[in-house]
Image (tube, grey):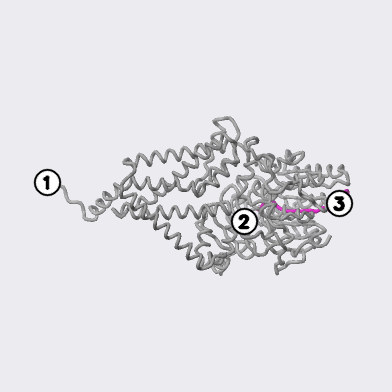
Amino acid sequence: MSRLPHAPPATAGLRRRLEAARPFLGPALLWCVLHGLLSLGFFGSSLLSAAERLAPALRPLVLAGGVVQSLFLGLLVFVVALPLVLLGRHYVVGVSVVVAVGVALLGVDSLVLSSLGFHINGLVLAVALQPRALAETGLSSAEVLLVAAGAVTLLGLDVWAGVLFLRRRHGPRRVLRAVLLLTVLCAGERLMSAYLIFSHGGAVQHAATTLPLQAPVRMNTLLTRFTGQTPAAGLRLGVSPEAGVPAATIDPAAVRFTRRPDIVIILAESLRDDFFRQDVMPNLWRRAGDGTRFLLHHSAASSTDYSLFGLFFGLEAQRRDAVVGAGRTPLLFPALRQNGYHQVFFAASSVDWMGLKDTVFRDVQGGLRTDYEGRSHLRDEAMVKDALAVVETAPSDTPLFLFLFFAGTHFDYDYPPRSEVFSPAWDGTGGLATTRVPGEHLKARAWNAAYEVDTKVEALLSRIEAVRGRRPLTLFTGDHGEEFREYGRVGHATDVTAYQLHVPMLIFDERLAPGEVDAVTGHVDVVSTLFDLLGDTHDPALLGDGIPMTRPDPSRYLLTTIGWEPRYALIGQHLKIRFGAGLPGTELTDVRDQPLPDAQARFAAEAPRILRRLRGGAEHPGSAPVSAPDSRSTPAAAGPAAP
């Protein structure tokens, strides 16, 4: 009988190492799972807080899901460390190191989540790697060294304990079967969460993604088909014990406005800042000479529902699911009601499908009218007619609050023949065939739509001033911007580019000196700005995340997002940082997305301030007036003028 050839030395050595590591796989799986459960200690408080917003019947399911998610984290660490079996008997040390580092990252991630509301990402890592970043946030060199020494000691102890544990070889013997069982359990938890999100909305989604790496699974279309029911909107009434509680921390009855002018808030769909030009919007351009224009204003998000959340709650848009899902409503509307305002809300841009009637506008008297039909410029026309009917019949001694949401500037950028000003322009036909339409033709059609909205806004404001005999406090802006194939796309809600976030902001009020403000402002600032102009004296920190635009902070970083997808931008006066889903790390540009030759140097210099921003900051930037920025600013930036 012939003998089998000997295995090559390299293959034989590999086999020996694998055989040496095999007895430790079971203990390693158990060690990883136990450390995964430690994540409940880091994130337990956030998970309990999120679960408390749910109906009592849902809480045990969500909390049990959190336990399964922690097991998933342990399983993930085991899989990541699996290639270390090539180390043979040294696998024991290798997997112990990986597990210890994983636990440390979970601790850091829990701090990031508690301070800003999102998990660790490329931005956090980039900031942490900047020289002296931690020390310059207020920690002395000795404190940094002490913290580092403590962290290294804990890591060392964890590795030592892991080596001892693994060498005793306690753990499941059938490792593959245990891994499959854990995988099925984790997949089942995601499917259960998908059903609860379908049934109960955003609050469940927020709770089900509290632990890191828990991507939300949505099966709304499939579940709608099987159940015959529609998915829950941003909230399901009656689910939350906190329904109707204002998001702000003050009672609406405690708000005192020392002046009560009529207020008109005008929102235009998909209107980006560079559309505000003399030839595109001539009437508002002329009026801007008597108003205040904020040159670096940004929407809270590039999607409408998240943008309006930021605008009226005064909160950063990534907080939407937690706040709206818990049934909370804005402070602004009940505060206006407490101060004698008659409020009316119109939206020619239908917001029913976004659930805004049941979320942002749920607490308004009379609700929000958004049932207009026909082409968008005709819906706008009917909306203006309805608003003016209210103006002409309202008592002169009752202050009015009017909200109008124009649809004409939304795709497909509709307008009547009188506004055919720019050409060649896309004719609006074809829909999906716009991929063959040049971007400049699409933009020309959008300019014409903006020209038509400008015409209608002028007719509205002129009539209000004539009927009421005084100029209202007026705020004009866009809900978000729009891209016209500058980056290959048409539309919005796809990125955090300047084209999708940078929107015009005009405020007309006797307490603001006319001029331009060249400091970063955002939709989250609107509530605190209105309260400031109306004479309320509450600390802006109690109103939300914004600061009064009457006292801009040139050193701030504004946090914006897509909304439905976790991609973000921190926007500062001289540096913009994009990070999150779909981006490999961080992208550094100026505020208008233009490359910076010294981007890394600027980022290094700003790292301490960015880190303080991520940690929540030591003091609220809107608590005291700040000096106005240097470039192109007028006295309007320094604070409100005397009444």
Amino acid type, label 3:
Glu
Amino acid type, label 2:
Leu
Helix, strand or loop at label 2? It is strand
Q: Nearer the viewer, mark 2 or mark 1?
A: 2
What's the distance in space between the residues labelled 2 and 1, CA to CA? 74 Å
What's the distance in space between the residues labelled 3 and 1, CA to CA? 106 Å
Answer whether residue 445 is visible to the viewer in this image: no
Helix, strand or loop at label 3? It is helix
Q: Which residue is mark 3?
A: 465
What residue do we see at 63% from left, 50% from top? 317
In the figure, residue 9 lies in which quadrant? bottom left
Magenta span of residues: 462-481
Give the mark nearer the N terminus: 3 vs 1: 1
- For residue 240, side relative to residue 162 (left or right): right
Q: State the mark number for residue 2.
A: 1
- Whole-percent x, y for residue 196 in the image: 55, 36
What residue do we see at 36% from left, 52% from top? 162
- For residue 482, side relative to residue 218 (left or right): right
Q: Nearer the viewer, mark 2 or mark 3?
A: 2
Amino acid type, label 1:
Ser
